[in-house]
Image (cartoon, rainbow, N blue to C red):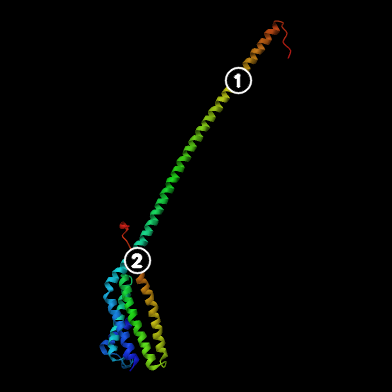
Amino acid sequence: MGAFLALGAGWLIQGPSQALRDLLGDPWIILWSAIVAIGGLCGLVASLSAHRDEGLSLLTERIALWSIGTYSAVYVIAMLYQRGLSIWVTEAVFTFFVIACVWRLVQVQKRITWNKKVGRDARLRWAR
Amino acid sequence: MNLLTDVALPVITATVASGIVVGLLTLRAQRRQINAGASAQEATALDVLTGTALKMVQDARSESLAAKSEAIQAREDATAARRRAEAAEERAADAARAATDCARQVMECSAYSHTLEGLLVGAGIPLPRQ
């Protein structure tokens, strides 16, 4: 997550690389830089608050997985669309990254849904 | 027209960005719900533990009461048995005393019979044949 935060912040400060600009297009690359930076920041917050605040940890982790996973997916699609399988190793790495993000996102979403359901169904002991 | 950069990428970018914005905006309310659920689970776990401990205490207390009543019953049984033994011992002593009295009376009767026989023999009266 720290790497993604540094990557997105670096793109925002110094501008993305020309190769990435060619891949994702000029107006969107800035927005994707912000998305990656926000995702990395949320991932760090999720890691730091994992043992103290489960709600904050789960929600920020969901945002991080959503942003970084979609960025990786867009990156893979753009690479496949423009360069085919000529850089298949990079494409495979980011594809596995997308799969891992989706896998973890499903777990996080299940946990969030479960906690919300328990919170809705909870009644005060003296009110039963 | 580039399908990726002109159509797909703007749609995906807008979706992802709006998802992040919605997630950040609803973070506080959802966080409260999730933490309420987590607290409810912890409370349920503590409730189960407390209930289990309370049941163990109640079981131990009822077992203690049962053991105490069993001890009382055993003590009462022992007292009754001791009383029965004392009564039997007393009856045995009475029986021995009665047997001694009988033996003494038999001896007295025997001595009296010998005396009578002597008197009969001295008076020249023949003794009856057995």
> Measuring 36% from the left and 74% from the top, which residue is drawn there?
A109
Q: Quadrant of the N terminus of chain B?
A: bottom left
Q: Is residue A105 above or below residue B1?
A: above
Mark in the foreground, 2 or 1: 2
Q: Secondary structure at mark 2?
A: helix
Type of amino acid under label 1: Cys
> Measuring 35% from the left and 87% from the top, which residue is drawn there?
A74
Quarter of the rendering containing residue A40: bottom left
Q: What residue did someone put label 2 on?
A: A118
| Residue B25 appears left or right of A87 | left
Both on one chain, marks 2 and 1? no
Chain under disc 2: A
Residue occupying the far top of the picture: B123
User: How many numbered tags mark residues here?
Assistant: 2
- Percent across and percent down for residue A72 are 36, 85
- Percent across and percent down for residue A104 are 38, 77
Q: Is residue B115 above or below residue B20?
A: above
| Residue B71 appears left or right of A105 | right
> Measuring 44% from the left and 45% from the top, which residue is drawn there?
B66
Q: What residue did someone put label 1 on?
A: B102
Can I make out residue A93 in this image? yes
| Residue A103 appears left or right of B108 | left
